[in-house]
Amino acid sequence: MTLPVPELSARARAVFRLVVEGYLGSGAPVGSRTLSRVGTLNLSPASIRSVMGDLEALGLLAAPHTSAGRMPTETGLRLFVDAMMQADEPTEQERAAIRAQATAPGTVEETLAATSAVLSGLSACAGIVLVPRAEPVLRHFSLLPLSADRAVAVLVGDDGQVENRVVELAPGTPSAALVEAGNYISARLAGLTLPQAQAQLSAEITAGRSALDAVAQGLVARGLAIWTEDGARRPVMIVRGAANLIDEAAAADLERVRQLLDEIDGKEEIARVLETAREAKACKIFIGAENKLFALSGSSVIAAPYHSPDGRVVGVVGVIGPTRLNYARVVPMVDFTAQTLSRWIR
């Protein structure tokens, strides 16, 4: 059980802050002799070691080796982030770089991937973003013959986007069945999302209300299934800049880095972690073993939701990196990125 910051003495708070900031800057434990050279403390190395010992007893600091300096524990990092950290807002150059990618023309996936990449570069972490699953609303659908056994299915969404897919045909499929299937979808299923259209088609066939013959029914079901399967396969998370996780400090702990990269490869697990940030009002910070997924790698995730104009949460953007990342700089950067994406989404 750790003490709240106000119950730490001013001297303990000052030493603790310097140890944390020194560790986050270098990735290495901070020794008493190093801190004694900081003019603001006016303490001897012996006095600093005594304070460090007290902080270690509280579970806020740890000594990786007997003769080494101290480094913050995950509990200490949480205390620092929640109660002592002074945010360092993004510079105008950083803001401009984020805005440029978040408002660039292109598909949603392209924009989110570019934004994740620039966030990765600025934070020196891996950038991550949850992509909203697209559920296009049908406006028009047609099937055009390509050959005796293939046709192209053309879907026009309510947003005006047009997508084409090739559909395999059963031998001897008449061209009239293609026209019938396209007309049925356009007339009966327009205004519905793909899952809704599939459900309605199934209900009508089951109740015997469908005027389609068996061939046309199969074409309609197959045409709708193509886009539903595409949506299910679409990656729910984009990761950019994983190479940033392999730096000089990480070289001494290759097993941790390997574990972290394995975790990133398992996108579904991290996506589930990000999903828990959807209801956050600002940035949500996961530090190390606070989430069992990162217990082995000692990683941290900073994530924030971004919204549609009506306030609905669309997705989550953030970064993943070692627990020693620069929280004071990265937290406001992730928050600004989420705000920028919220303004861009229409």
Image (cartoon, grey):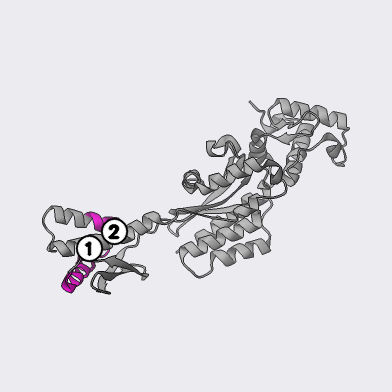
For residue 336, the mark is none
Label 1 sits on what residue type? Val
* Residue receiving disc 2: 225
Q: Is residue 216 left or right of residue 105?
A: left
Mostly what secondary structure, the magenta segment?
helix
176 magenta-colored:
yes
* Residue receiving disc 1: 220
* Rendering coords of residue 163 (x, y %): 35, 69
Quarter holding the N terminus?
A: top right
Depth order, front residue of 82/45: 45
10 Å crowding of disc 2: few (<14), some (14-19), many (20+) = some
Quarter holding the C terminus?
A: bottom left
Sequence-first disc among 2 and 1: 1
Depth order, front residue of 107/294: 294
For image coordinates 25% across by 61% down, the residue present is: 222
10 Å crowding of disc 1: few (<14), some (14-19), many (20+) = many
Q: Quadrant of residue 13?
A: top right
Specify the segment rendered in magenta: 173-199
**Local SS, label 1:** helix
